[in-house]
Structure formats: structure tokens, C-alpha cells
Amino acid sequence: MEWTIKKFNDLTLDELYEICKVRYEVFACEQKIHKENDLDYIDKESFHLFLQNKNEIVAYARLIPKGLLYNEASIGRVLVVNEYRRQGIASKLVKKAVECIKKEFKEEHIVLSSQLYAKDLYKRHGFKVISDIYNQVDIPHVKMKLF
């Protein structure tokens, strides 16, 4: 399996299709998120980090430059496909995402909106909770920051 990071315009059509497919599977089909359009203008300005097994994407995160969503760079749309969970891939994904933001964006501070159940994953990588619990698309979240 191989990690890839690309700007939106550098993605192949097959890669873009696979990204859209796994995001739909995880966020719409599994988590029943239908109140927010998954595809937004932020995709075009972001880097896309993904892990592939053959031609299938098994893990993904969107790396967002500062100023688009928050005053800091951020990580979003974090996912691991169901069949690949509980293998440590999510932790490797977060580590790689932080490394890529530091390298590509030259940023040290990173913000994200974590689903409440996943906050410990980010805590293990140095993120700290900086908000009370809030609902986003009917799912409890907390805002977290890497200082």
C-alpha cells in the first residue's frame, strides 16, 4: 500500500472518482450525513492525502490551507474504509497528514473538527480539545488544535 498526496488539479480522474466514492460510502451511507454537501469549493484548494491498495483508496484526508475554513491549516474528511479499520491506519493517516501540512503549507498550528468518538485518536498526536461539544450534521464534535 502506498501513500499519495496531490493537489486537486493533479488528481487523475480515477483518483478523483475513488475519493468521491469512499467519501460517499463512509459519510453518506455509513454515517447518514445528508444535511451537508460533501463536495464543496474547499476540495479545489486543498491537498488530498490517500492510501491505496492496488487501485482502491482505503484511507483519505483532506488537507486545507489556512484561511479557507479556519485561521489555521486544517485536516478534514478523515476516513478509513470499513474493511481496513482497527489496523492502525487511522493513526498513520493523522501522522502523515500533520507531516504533509508542516511540509507543504509550512504551518505548525493545525485545527480540526473531530467527531467526539474519535478525539482520542487526535489526542495521541498532540491535538488538544479547544471547544465544548457541539453538533455538526447531528453528530457530536469537538474542535481540536495542534499547537
Image (spheres, grey):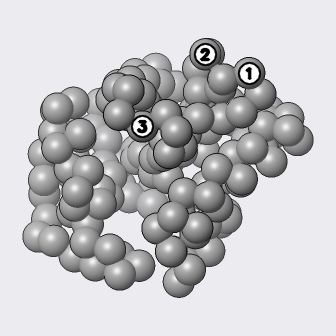
Label ID, residue 54? 1
Quadrant location of the C terminus in the rendered image: top left
Q: Which of 141/82 is in front? A: 82
Residue 87, x across and y down, in percent: 38, 26
Query: What's the residue type where badge 2 is placed?
Result: Met
Residue 114, x across and y down, in percent: 29, 56
Residue that lies at the very extreme toward the right in this rendered image? 13
Residue visible at 74% across and 21% down in the picture: 54
Q: Which residue is mark 3?
A: 85
Residue 14, x across and y down, in percent: 85, 38
As helix, strand or loop, the secondary structure at mark 2 comes to loop
In the image: residue 125, left or right of residue 70: left
As helix, strand or loop, the secondary structure at mark 1 comes to loop
Q: How far apart in space, not on screen, are marks 3 and 1 (Cα)? A: 17 Å
Within 10 angstroms of label 1, few (less than 14), some, or many (20 or more) residues? few
Query: What's the residue type where badge 3 is placed?
Result: Arg
In the image: residue 133, left or right of residue 16: left
Q: How far apart in space, not on screen, are marks 3 and 2 (Cα)? A: 15 Å
As helix, strand or loop, the secondary structure at mark 3 comes to loop
| Nearest to N terminus: mark 3 or mark 2 | 2
Residue visible at 41% across and 79% down in the picture: 137
Q: Which of 31/60 is in front? A: 31
Label ID, residue 1? 2
CB of mark 2 within 8 Å of CB of mark 1?
Answer: no
Residue visible at 79% across and 33% down in the picture: 10
